[in-house]
Amino acid sequence: MHRRRREQVYQWLDHESVDAAYVTGDAEIRYLTGMPSDSVLVLFRTGRCVLLPWDVNLASERAEADEIIPYTEFDRKLTDALRAVLGDAAGPGRRVEIPADTPHPSLGDIRDAACGAEVVCRVDGLTGEISRMRSIKDDSELALLGRAAELTNKVIDELDEALGAGSLESELDIALFLERRARSLGGEGTGFEPIVAGPSRSNGIHAFPAFTGARFARTGSGIIDFGINFDGYTSDVTVTVLFGEPSAALRRMTDLVQQAYDESIERIEEGVDARDIARRVDTVFERAGYSMPHGLGHGIGLEVHEAPWLKSSGEAPALLSRGMVFTVEPGLYHSTDGGVRLENDVMLTADGPTIITTSRILRYA
């Protein structure tokens, strides 16, 4: 699996006449080798890779690479590692690509390590190519995301039961419940820091801090945004909780979010421009006098936010393709009325869109 993915990278390097490149992002390295964290991966046009992990024991257990060299052998200094590893890929007439987010002060030392090779740093280079690769999930990735969704659905049901019984009193109680259940069910934990915002804080898109010790009040709307990580792949859902009899304004917001969500799901199919779906949601809200202050959705996988991006802006078409897994999450927020967001994960297959999570508006008297 990892070799097959790397083969696509080698072909890209050859097409771009790049002799060697390295990546440092955890998600990129896990995608290409299985190593979950804290490494550098050097890839060669000739079809070879060298993994430089900090934890060599973990790499020996989890990673698949042609050569594994402890990063500590180079005192965890990237330039020393590059001098030792690049070999014939360095020197005059060669091209070495570095990540687009490389700090400018590092560039001089990296050029020295490349020994006269042309150092290529571009926004849409190898990191962009890997992002495009990761936006289309293979069968193994779809299975892992499906399993993450199964665990998430179980936790949503348990959360519903606990909230209804009143056994989770504070934002902290809910956040710890989510983390404990994610790990108890066999996940690596929550996919990101859960956002648990009671009615006094639900008007934020992403409340800060993500959760507090405050009571999750029993009036108004609360937002619970979380995911479960299974073998590196995370879900991402948002549950809105309504307590008591909502105000007329909150009922209106809830109805509009549900309408926008339903219309979005109806429009998802292969080849559709995601911008058109997002613009339809903008229209639904604007006609009612509201606006949504964030995009409609985003891809999920080894990262909670990755391609594709479902948003109304952008000059180039954003065509949905089979194998993509992404969120749909319309939301509205008001400084006094509170916030409402409904978010589920969608897998686009040959049979059309499949909603793999079961998030919904939870209502309690």
Image (cartoon, rainbow, N blue to C red):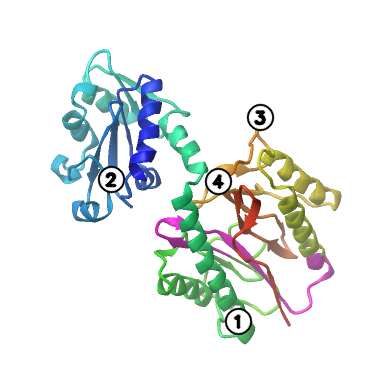
Residue drawn at x 78%, y 61% is 253
Q: What's the distance in space between the residues labelled 2 and 4, CA to CA? A: 28 Å
The residues tagged by marks 2 and 1 sit, at their Cα atoms, a distance apart of 42 Å
Q: How many marks?
A: 4
Which residue is drawn at the image coordinates 41% and 35% (left, top)?
101
Determine the secondary structure under disc 2.
Answer: strand
Q: Amino acid at mark 1?
A: Glu
Whether tag 1 and tag 4 are in contact, CB under 8 A, the answer is no
Image disc number at residue 331? none
Mark 1: secondary structure? helix
Identity of the amino acid at label 3? Glu
Which of the 4 image quarters holds residue 233?
bottom left
Q: Quadrant of the N terminus?
A: top left
Q: Earlier in the sequence, mark 3 or mark 1?
A: 1
- Which element type, helix, strand or loop, lies under badge 4? loop
Q: Quadrant of residue 102?
A: top left
- The image shows residue 176 at horizontal and vertical percentages of 46, 74
Q: Report if residue 46 is visible in the image.
A: yes
Magenta region: which residues?
Answer: 225-251
Inter-mark Cα distance, 3 to 1: 45 Å
**Residue carrying label 2:** 39
Residue 234 shown in magenta: yes
Look at the image and tell me in which quarter the C terminus lies.
Answer: bottom right
Q: State the mark number for residue 161.
A: 1
Residue 209 in sight: no
Amino acid bearing label 2: Ser
In front: 150, or 107?
150
Give the amino acid at mark 4.
Answer: Gly
Where is mark 4, residue-wise? 323
Is residue 338 depicted above or below 243 in this figure?
above
